[in-house]
Image: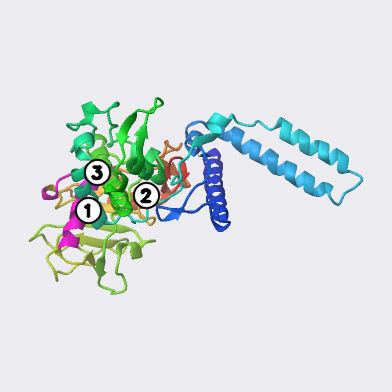
């Protein structure tokens, strides 16, 4: 029950901050910064602490309930003159007795772009462009593999962090953007990471962050065999037989099987339980759906898929992926694999939310599927255990 309450609390606090920002923007107190309304306050809600500390989350929830109760009692006191004083006393008692959390746990330092969200849509072409920008501007400190061991890393006051772990999911989109653009300093004011400033456009910074997430997802899968944090299917233009679908985002609400085909490979059979998107077929070949947009766009789709799988583009043919109805990559099939099974589910729901990671949206039972149909068993498991992304503790 508490995970559901925690999810509701996180969603409510996120909506409250977004609403406050929208109101301040309307009043002219939150001007546009880098294309989106700024967060004009020095602090934001530290949702990441709510995720990692259940006791703290309970205190925040109880305090909000006490505050709501006090407001309700005060509202009742307005028309009820005879009981006004006792009701006021009750309202004050609710506020005094509420288990208010400590400010340093409730609030975190904020920057003007804290609540910004990436406008890129995790496009495959943007991921590939971001890779090129990373190699040109970032690799000397962060290294070709993102582990922070580039040739210039030793000259910095602090070694760069490893970008292959959960760091990119623990931080808010907008705060990652700010750190790349403005840089970072330690408590003594010494620069620990130089910012790119105006050397990169805003869209280039967002695309670098997309590339880093795709690369980190692939390294996570390669090293641990799982995606501990949900990863979206890289978005791409597609062409489907029914003719109405023009983009992979149009497939939202449907399960999708992504097949990395090779030249000369046998045709991939359709399956009514999923939409089949085949990447790697020659132009004009028959497939339920396939990437479109010219040779460069198709190559970008393949390169982005290889990144999230943690393989080279030469190793990509033969891999399969299954995407759930919400657009999250959930299962991986290796080249030469004969059949699907529940063991292929590499992004799973968990009982308690991981910091910035997989969180159970809801959990329900499912009937056991026939052992002979591993794909059906996997689909039922995937549908029964949906996941969602938490960035900086907030749902996205």
Left or right, 12 with respect to 316, comes to right
Q: In front of the other: label 3 or label 1?
A: 1
Residue 251, picture quadrant: bottom left
Q: Earlier in the sequence, mark 1 or mark 2?
A: 1
Q: Position of residue 45 (x, y in %)?
A: 53, 39
Secondary element at image label 2: helix
Where is residue 274 shown, x and y percent of the image? 31, 61
Res 347 quadrant in image: top left
Q: Is residue 270 visible?
A: yes
Q: Indicate yes or no whether the magenta region holds residue 308.
A: yes
Residue at image x 22%, y 27%?
155
Question: Within 10 angstroms of label 1, few (less than 14), some, or many (20 or more) residues?
Answer: some
Of tags 3 and 2, the one toward the viewer is 3
Neighbours of disc 2 within 10 Å: few (<14), some (14-19), many (20+): many
Report whether 304 appears left or right of 252: left
User: What is the distance, in whole Å, between disc 1 and disc 2 at their CAs?
Assistant: 32 Å
Q: In the image, residue 119 lies at what x, y percent?
A: 37, 56
* Magenta-tinted stretch: 296-314
Tell me how far mark 3 sits from mark 1, CA to CA. 13 Å
Question: Along the polypeptide, which appears first: circle 3 or circle 1?
Answer: 1
Prevailing secondary structure of the magenta residues: helix
Q: Which residue is mark 3?
A: 215
Whether 288 is drawn above or below 364: the answer is below
The residue lying toward the viewer, choosing from 104 and 218, is 104
Find residue 129 and name its label. 1
Residue extending farthest left: 264
Q: Residue at x 18, y 44 (%)?
A: 135
Neighbor class of circle 3 (other Cα within 10 Å; few <14, some 14-19, many 20+) is many
Judging by the rendered image, the residue that carries numbered circle 2 is 382
């Amino acid at each position: 029950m508490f995970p559901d309450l925690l999810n509701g609390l996180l969603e409510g606090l996120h909506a409250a901050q977004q609403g406050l920002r929208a109101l301040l923007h309307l009043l002219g107190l939150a001007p546009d910064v880098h294309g989106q309304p700024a967060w004009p306050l020095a602090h934001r809600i530290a949702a990441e602490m709510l995720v990692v500390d259940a006791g703290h989350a309970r205190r925040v929830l109880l305090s909000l309930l006490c505050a709501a109760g006090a407001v309700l009692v005060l509202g009742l006191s307005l028309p009820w003159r005879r009981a006004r004083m006792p009701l006021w006393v009750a309202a004050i008692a609710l506020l005094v007795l509420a288990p208010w959390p400590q400010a340093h746990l409730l609030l975190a330092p904020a920057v003007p772009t804290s609540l910004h969200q990436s406008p890129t849509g995790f496009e495959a072409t943007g991921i590939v462009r971001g890779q090129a920008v990373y190699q040109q501007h970032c690799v000397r400190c962060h290294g070709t593999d993102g582990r922070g061991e580039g040739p210039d890393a030793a000259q910095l006051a602090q070694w760069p962090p490893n970008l292959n772990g959960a760091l990119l999911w623990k931080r808010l989109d907008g705060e990652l953007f700010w750190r790349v653009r403005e840089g970072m300093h330690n408590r003594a004011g010494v620069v620990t990471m130089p910012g790119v400033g105006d050397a990169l456009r805003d869209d280039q910074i967002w695309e670098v962050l997309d590339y880093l997430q795709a690369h980190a997802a692939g390294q996570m899968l390669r090293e641990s065999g799982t995606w501990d944090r949900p990863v979206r299917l890289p978005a791409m233009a597609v062409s489907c037989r029914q003719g109405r679908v023009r983009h992979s985002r149009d497939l939202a609400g449907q399960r999708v099987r992504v097949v990395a085909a090779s030249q000369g490979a046998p045709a991939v059979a359709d399956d009514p339980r999923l939409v089949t998107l085949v990447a790697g077929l020659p132009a004009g070949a028959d497939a339920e759906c396939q990437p479109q947009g010219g040779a460069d766009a198709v190559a970008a789709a393949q390169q982005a898929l290889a990144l999230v799988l943690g393989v080279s583009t030469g190793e990509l043919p033969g891999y399969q992926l299954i995407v759930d109805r919400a657009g999250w990559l959930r299962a991986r099939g290796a080249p030469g694999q004969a059949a699907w099974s529940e063991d292929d589910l590499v992004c799973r729901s968990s009982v308690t939310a991981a910091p910035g990671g997989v969180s159970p949206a809801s959990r329900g039972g499912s009937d056991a599927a026939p052992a002979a149909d591993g794909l059906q068993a996997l689909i039922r498991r995937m549908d029964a255990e949906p996941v969602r992304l938490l960035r900086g503790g907030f749902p996205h």
